[in-house]
């Protein structure tokens, strides 16, 4: 270059949302450009700085600069690279026009531009590539993530409890934090913990907000699914929990949602426990002259339900629990019978596996057909997603059942034995001085818990039904209750058909 002193603007630009971390900072660009100007005999009219992306046209400093060049304030622009000047075709065209019509000079330390038809063609390409680069970057990132999710790979940073495995490109359980996630689900499933008391310390050692607990408990990734862009995919990562445990937590959450108020369990241990048998409203409590009374909320209007002293409810519940308690000798005998039954069943389990395999195959075929229907436009995308998510849930369930049948998952034996164990522990619970313990246990065993006059009635949950029946059988009393309903005051009924504790559906 042998021109006399060129009078140019320095134009430096870097946007805060610039994805390209390799772009130099504005002070670096300016100092490099000054050095370049000194070496090449360029006179700097003014340094113009812009902190805005060049993806869209309409940059203020850039537009003003073009205006001043058109007026002749400077002969052209000195910038680090063409992509500093334009990353969209509109701005690129404006520059080319200036170059072609006003002989405007463009100088770049990193790029040689000559004002010839060939030079202008190359410059246009440079602007075009910049634009392409920006477009591709975001689209490629999005497409890459979508494809990853389709292959069942969690596409972004590993969620809490997992770590990114750079070799396999997927996520692995985090040895340090995965146990926290598991215990979170296990604790919440008991129904005894709120989000607040399940808060935990994160990697920074800070107590997380309750919203994080909520997020974890609602995230299907922990039982093996990947949710991305509103769609669900089967993950290839190791699940931390079973779908069963996840569903249990969901059920607890739903129940909580219904419980509008939290109560002081010390003074009102049996609130949220019973429903009025006359009108179906819940039974609440109030304190009168130092005594706790339980009574109908009468939200639906008049009700003939009575006021019942807290001590009476306590007695009723204790007596109900005692009915299903077992002595250690009895629990040993029943436990032995259950194990025998389990072994017989395991032998029959082989055919069950076959059925499940067939179910799984149907599920997969249906998924394929669904995709075909979606591709051929027979169903809408929303319909496709909704149906697909249901099917994937179904698949997860079948897979769990398969594990259970093959013996490396949950079997009915464990829960049944734990019921026996709980029943043996009732002796301790009924001796407890804390009525809240009684209330918790009563919820565990009984459904449809009502208060009729001064009497507490309930239906034993399926796992406890057999035990309750067996207990009643022991006392060999004349039956005067229906099969489904047990009155605490009643000493028993005949229930031979229920006298073993086989698997419940
Ligand atoms: Zn009532």
Image: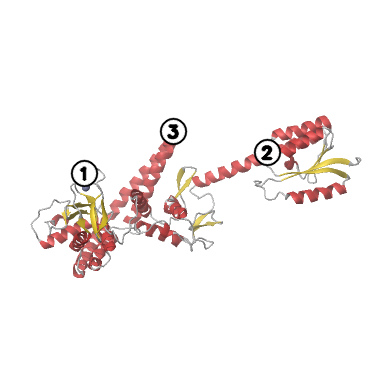
Question: Do labels 1 and 2 touch, CB within 8 Å?
Answer: no
Q: CA distance from mark 1 to mark 2?
A: 74 Å
* Residue hosting label 1: 302
Could you classify mark 2 by the number of other residues whose Cα lies within 10 Å: few (under 14), some (14-19), or many (20 or more)?
A: many
Horizontal relation, residue 269 to residue 466: left or right: right
Marked residue nearer the N-terminal end (1 or 3): 1
**Quadrant of the rendering where the N terminus is positioned:** top right
Q: Secondary structure at mark 2?
A: helix
Q: Residues within 10 Å of mark 3 (few under 14, many from 20)?
A: few
- Residue 329 seen by the camera: yes
Q: Earlier in the sequence, mark 3 or mark 2?
A: 2
Residue tagged by mark 2? Answer: 131
User: What residue is shown with label 3?
Assistant: 380
The residue under the point 68% across, 42% down is 53
Ligand 1 within 8 A of label 2's CB? no
> Residue placed farthest to the front in the image?
289
Q: How far across and down, in percent of the image, does residue 251 sit?
A: 34, 51
Q: Residue 296, percent across and down?
A: 23, 50
């Amino acid at each position: 270059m042998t021109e006399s002193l060129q009078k140019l603007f320095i134009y430096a630009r870097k946007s805060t949302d610039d994805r390209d971390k390799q772009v130099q900072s504005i002070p670096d660009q300016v100092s490099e450009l000054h050095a370049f100007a000194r070496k090449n005999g360029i006179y700097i009219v003014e340094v113009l700085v812009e902190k805005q992306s060049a993806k869209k046209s309409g940059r203020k400093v850039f537009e003003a600069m073009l205006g001043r060049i058109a007026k002749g304030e400077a002969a052209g622009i000195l910038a680090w690279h063409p992509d500093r000047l334009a990353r969209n075709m509109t701005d690129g065209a404006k520059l080319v026009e200036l170059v072609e019509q006003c002989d405007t000079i463009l100088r770049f330390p990193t790029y040689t531009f000559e004002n010839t038809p060939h030079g202008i063609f190359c410059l246009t390409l440079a602007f075009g590539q910049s634009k392409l680069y920006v477009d591709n970057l975001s689209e490629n990132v999005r497409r890459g993530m979508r494809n990853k999710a389709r292959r069942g790979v969690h596409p972004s940073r590993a969620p809490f409890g997992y770590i990114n495995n750079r070799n396999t490109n997927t996520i692995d359980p985090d040895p340090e934090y995965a146990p926290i996630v598991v215990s979170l689900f296990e604790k919440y499933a008991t129904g005894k913990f709120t989000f607040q008391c399940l808060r935990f310390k994160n990697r920074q050692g800070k107590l997380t907000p309750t919203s994080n607990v909520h997020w974890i408990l609602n995230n299907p990734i922990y039982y093996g699914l990947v949710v991305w862009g509103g769609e669900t995919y089967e993950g290839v990562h190791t699940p931390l929990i079973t779908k069963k445990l996840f569903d249990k937590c969901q059920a607890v959450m739903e129940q909580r949602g219904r419980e509008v108020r939290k109560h002081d369990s010390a003074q009102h241990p049996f609130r949220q426990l019973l429903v009025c048998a006359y009108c179906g409203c819940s039974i609440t409590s109030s304190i009168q002259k130092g005594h706790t009374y339980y009574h109908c909320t009468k939200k639906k209007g008049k009700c003939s339900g009575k006021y019942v002293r807290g001590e009476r409810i306590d007695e009723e519940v204790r007596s109900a629990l005692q009915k299903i308690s077992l002595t250690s000798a009895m629990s040993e005998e029943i436990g032995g019978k259950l194990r025998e039954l389990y072994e017989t069943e395991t032998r029959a389990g082989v055919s069950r596996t076959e059925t499940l395999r067939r179910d799984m195959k149907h599920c997969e075929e249906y998924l394929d057909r669904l995709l075909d229907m979606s591709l051929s436009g027979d169903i809408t995308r929303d319909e496709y997603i909704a149906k697909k998510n249901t099917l994937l849930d179904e698949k997860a369930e079948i897979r769990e059942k398969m594990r259970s049948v093959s013996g490396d998952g949950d079997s009915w034996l464990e829960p049944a034995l734990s019921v026996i164990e709980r029943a043996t522990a009732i002796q301790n619970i009924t001796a407890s001085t804390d009525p809240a313990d009684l209330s918790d246990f009563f919820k565990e065993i009984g459904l449809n818990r009502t208060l009729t006059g001064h009497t507490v009635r309930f239906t034993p949950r399926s796992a406890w039904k057999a035990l309750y029946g067996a207990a009643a059988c022991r006392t060999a009393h004349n039956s005067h209750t229906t099969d489904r309903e047990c009155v605490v005051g009643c000493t028993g009924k005949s229930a031979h058909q229920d006298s073993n504790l086989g698997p419940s559906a």
